[in-house]
Amino acid sequence: MQTCEYCLKIENLTVAYGKRVALENINLHLSKGEFHAVVGPNGGGKTTLVKAILGLIKPLSGNIMIFGKPQKEYLKENTIGYLPQTHSTNISRVPLKVIDVVLMGCMGYRGLTGYRKDVIKRVEKIMDMLEVLDRRNNLFDDLSGGLKQRVLIARALVSNPELLIMDEPTVGLDVKAQKDFYTLIKKLREQLNITIIMVSHDVGFVFEYADTVVCVNKRVHLHTKHKDELPKDFFNRLYGYDVKFVDHRHGDPDA
Amino acid sequence: MLITGTVTLMLELFKYSFLQRAVVVGMFTGSALAILGIVVVMRRMAFFGSGLAHIAFGGIGLAVLLGISPFPVAVIFSVCAAVFLGYLRTQNVSEDTSIGILFSLSMALGVILLSLGKKGYGDLTSYLFGDILAIGKYEARVMIIVSMIGMVFMYLFHDHLAYFTMDEDYTKLMYPRMKFVYFVYLILLAVMIVLALKILGVILVSALFIIPAAAGLIVGGEYHRAFWIALAFVNVSIFAGIMLSYFLDIPTGPAIVVLEGGGFFSILFLKKK
Ligand SMILES: Nc1ncnc2c1ncn2[C@@H]1O[C@H](COP(=O)(O)OP(=O)(O)OP(=O)(O)O)[C@@H](O)[C@H]1O
Ligand SMILES: [Mg+2]
């Protein structure tokens, strides 16, 4: 197997919606097996960056390599685990059962008339890990927001991806569910040797757990390996005001 | 009483080949459109569908004026319109608006073209309301074959289309050929709608792809079940509608639509209780 230390190499990426430039000349190298956090203000272009990586938006210019392969080639042969930002889906229009939603993650393995038994088995295992298996026959739309989010995380994981991209996964989760989610991320990293890219506004969490932090506001503002290297006025520059660090351990109901 | 009545009715039915044909063609076309219609209803494309039917009318007008067979021309018109609408959607014109414009434009064109022809307005009512009893052998064969293609397609791709409706980006990511599948779906839908004009005409045809699907989704709750309920619903309506029109001597298309509409609202109110 060919080895390559980078999971993602982005060069001179520029993305625009019509005449409005959302990302300008982005250069980014993210290494394999690590947990990368993407932060930035609303409208900064985080979701746009994610969609460009996934090939869902055609950039004006630029080059994206995933695990050493050109993006198109990689996407043809592999799936990337993806958790979209919640408001970008039309969930309520389609009365899908929870199990069907998770099966969306295995579309590539679908036979002509349905899914194989072993695919279903794996799906059930991952649903069990996320504690949503007992809801398999409920309508997805009837679940609470937090449970929906867990089902969507399961959907992102069922294809056994090498790369998992999550766009604001903890939005709508209560404190316990957030804690569970962070534990899950840890577990995933230990068990699956997976590279994770996660968009988040949860600055406290990001600096506790992430290996690198990428700040996107039209350009990549900062990309540091060690959180200690952050300049003092970093958040002020990024968001326009000082961000208070929220320590998760104090918000934990079990503590 | 009821049983002997039904039996006499059946015997009566099979004496006339045009009635036989009407029932068989009606059931095939209705079934295919009911299944395709589930996706129409989930994607909120009801206006798109009836738009395509009205756009076909322009093609009918053109063909009648030129003295050629109207339905192939209407199919071409509607398929082109479906593709054009797909293109307009990427151009920041709302789909609603572009359908609304093409809808009236093509209807107006159709009426003008028909009025220019030698026969005046000709069979205007049959184009507007359809006539299932007047379907010929050859047309029946084409309708049955295309309906079967539509049903097989939906059997293979109903999951893909449901996923696509729920989460477009995600589905494209997981299944790169999704855009093509959706494109084929739109073309099949356009062709089926134009063929069904024979049965219900430009004005009533939307009943076939909206009412059974809506009933299926309301009763079924979950979308796999919705397909079966829609199928049962449409086949009962079409069979009963044809019988009703035959024995009461009323127009067939409207009889089918009235039964469907009545059935839908009964279901809606029974479900509420
Ligand atoms: N589909 C679209 N059409 C036009 N402009 C868009 C579209 N999507 C995003 N934009 C614009 O691109 C810019 C970046 O948006 P993006 O959604 O990537 O931001 P974000 O960082 O994800 O924000 P948030 O934190 O609110 O999720 C914004 O100015 C936004 O208005
Ligand atoms: Mg976003």
Image (cartoon, grey):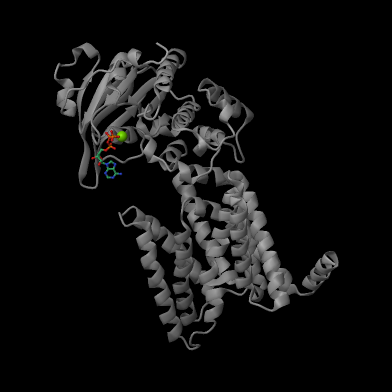
Q: In this view, does B147 lie above or below A93?
A: below
Residue located at (24% from left, 47% from top): A18
Q: In this view, does A147 lie above or below B36?
A: above
Q: Can residue A52 be seen in this view?
A: yes
Q: Can residue A1 be seen in this view?
A: no
Q: Quadrant of residue B80?
A: bottom left
Q: Is residue B162 left or right of residue B151?
A: left
The quadrant in which the C terminus of chain A is found is top left
Percent of width and height locating residue B136: 65, 74
Residue located at (43% from left, 77% from top): B110
* Front-most of residues A8 and B214: B214
Percent of width and height locating residue B164: 47, 44
In which of the image's four quarters is ligand 2 placed? top left
Percent of width and height locating residue B101: 36, 67
Residue located at (70% from left, 77% from top): B248
Counting labels gives 0
The quadrant in which the N terminus of chain A is found is top left
Percent of width and height locating residue B165: 47, 46
Residue located at (67% from left, 68% from top): B241
* Front-most of residues A141 and B83: A141
Q: Is residue A223 above or below residue B45?
A: above
Q: In which quarter of the image is residue A72?
A: top left
Q: In this view, does A6 lie to the left or right of B228?
A: left
* Front-most of residues B266 and A40: B266
* Front-most of residues B140 and B128: B128
Q: Is residue B183 above or below residue B140?
A: above
Q: Which residue lies furthest to the front in this view?
A: B273
Q: Is residue A226 left or right of residue A97?
A: left
